[in-house]
Image (cartoon, helix red, strand yellow):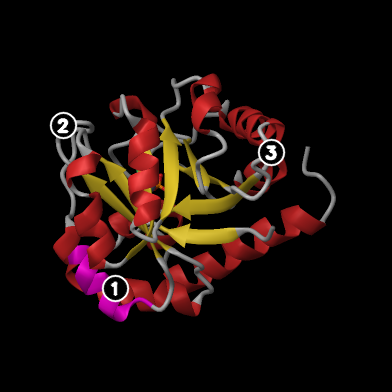
Amino acid sequence: MSVRIAPSILSADFAYLGDAVARVERGGADLIHVDVMDGHFVPNLTIGPAVVKSLKRVARTPLDVHLMITDPDRYIEAFAAAGAAMISVHLEVLPHLHRTVHAIKALGVKAGVVLNPSTPVGALEEIATDVDFVLAMSVNPGFGGQSFIPRSPAKVAAIRALLDRCGNFAAPIEIDGGIDAHNAARVVAAGARILVAGNAIFGAADPEVATRELKAIAGLALTGPSPR
Ligand code: DX5
Ligand code: ZN
């Protein structure tokens, strides 16, 4: 399994989203990460299906839609119709997570389950064989540009162990929050295979170059000597 880079457009200039997507795609972005926030589950408000639909027109890479909203069931169809290739939902808000995961898959979209930093890995146990991917938050969701929580690589390793024990070897682990050139190798070594990065890419002087560099570091961590 290679490592994919998913730049988060949350940190891009919203007046020039098409340009932001084109730049990171030139740098080798594998996915475009889209952060949807409702002002309830998280304090911030961001974007909805209309923006995803516009992004879909210009993006050549798949759209990875991260729903940080209290009632994802109401909006899954709209995001799928808008062009999401992957939709992830937070375990913390869903009493009927099994139903939600299968509703996403039934729409032909890859289904992911997200864990906040304080959510125990064991909460995934009963859904581990159903998910297409797991997203581990390495900051508390809501804002770009926060500091990486140091315990996160250990959590990624524990999620990988759980998925493997359940036989779901194919589901990659995505990691989101505070990822940059300094911690990328560590999270890859722990088992992360999709790296989301907002500030490290769009806060850089050249997002194209920043994407290329992050991808190179992540790729090296897969093949090179262990950084630990
Ligand atoms: C945080 C979002 C992240 C965010 C990452 O709630 O889910 O996707 O955009 O941004 P950085 O990489 O700046 O932490
Ligand atoms: Zn996100």
Say which of 171 and 127 sits in front: 127
Q: Residue at x 68, y 45 (%)?
A: 169
- Few, some or many residues within 10 Å of mark 3 (<14, 14–19, 20+): few
For the residues labelled 2 and 3, the Cα–Cα distance comes to 35 Å
Task: Name which residue type carries label 3.
Answer: Gly
**Which residue is farthest right?**
225
What whole-number distance in Å separates the C-alpha atoms at marks 1 and 3?
33 Å
Percent coordinates x, y for residue 131 in the rendering: 50, 43
**Does residue 13 show up?**
no
Three-letter residue code for mark 2: His
Relative to 20, is 134 above or below?
above
Indicate which disc residue 56 carries. 1
Q: Which residue position is annotated with label 3? A: 167
Compared to residue 143, the image places residue 59 above or below, namely below
First in sequence: mark 2 vs mark 1: 2
Q: Is mark 3 within 8 Å of ligand 2?
A: no
* Location of mark 2 (residue): 40
Return the x and y of residue 204 as percentages of the image width and height.
Answer: 43, 62
Image x and y of residue 97, in percent: 36, 32
Dot 2 falls on a residue whose secondary structure is loop
Amino acid identity at mark 1: Lys
- Give how far apart the Cα atoms at labels 2 and 1 are: 26 Å
Q: Nearer the viewer, residue 213 or 53?
A: 53
In this rendering, position of residue 155 left or right of residue 169: left
Q: What secondary structure is the stretch in magenta mostly built from?
A: helix
The secondary element bearing badge 1 is classed as helix
Earlier in the chain: of badge 1 and badge 3, it is 1
Which residues, given as a range, are shown in magenta? 51-59
Hey, which quadrant is residue 116 in on the image?
top left
